[in-house]
Image (spheres, rainbow, N blue to C red):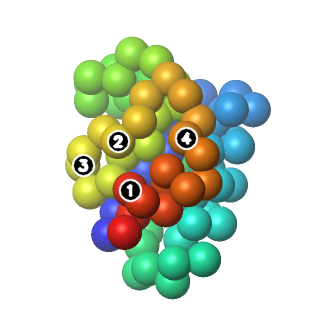
């Protein structure tokens, strides 16, 4: 599984990244987690509001930080 956190590095982006890491550890899933901070790459993916969570190329959330439970559901 490939998980990407898209955002310029703002506090909300960092919070999302930390929540994703925690969910991956809790669920024990085999996942590669990457942070994408390049605005041109983010907009090329159709994301206009950050932070965004992308799982296997599918944008799961944009413009908000999902709850830990939501993140776990997205990764299950």
Rendered residue at 41%/81% (across/down) = 30
N-terminal-most mark, 3 or 4: 3
Q: Distance between the Cα atoms at labels 2 and 1?
A: 7 Å
Circle 4 packing at 10 Å, graded few (<14), some (14-19), many (20+), is many
Helix, strand or loop at label 2? It is strand
In the displayed structure, does residue 44 sit left or right of residue 14?
left
Instruction: Determine which residue is flagged by label 3.
Output: 57
Q: Earlier in the sequence, mark 4 or mark 2?
A: 2
- Gap between marks 3 and 4 measured at Cα: 18 Å
- The residue sitting at 55% across, 41% down in the picture is 66
For disc 1, the marked residue is 74
N-terminal of the pair, mark 4 or mark 1, is 4
Contact? badges 2 and 1 (CB < 8 Å) = yes
Q: Quadrant of residue 31?
A: bottom left
Near-viewer residue (1 or 41): 1
Residue 33 in the image, given as x and y percentages of width and height: 48, 62
Check disc 3: other Cα within 10 Å, few if <14, some if 14-19, many if 20+. Answer: few
Residue 39 in which image quadrant: top left
Task: Give the labeled residue for mark 4.
Answer: 66
């Amino acid at each position: 599984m490939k998980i990407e956190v898209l955002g310029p590095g703002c506090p909300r982006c960092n919070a999302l990244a930390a929540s994703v890491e925690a969910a991956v550890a809790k669920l024990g899933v085999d996942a590669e987690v990457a942070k994408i901070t390049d605005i041109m790459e983010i907009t090329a993916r159709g994301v206009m509001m950050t932070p965004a969570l992308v799982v296997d190329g599918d944008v799961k959330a944009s413009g908000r930080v999902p709850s830990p439970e939501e993140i776990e559901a997205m990764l299950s």
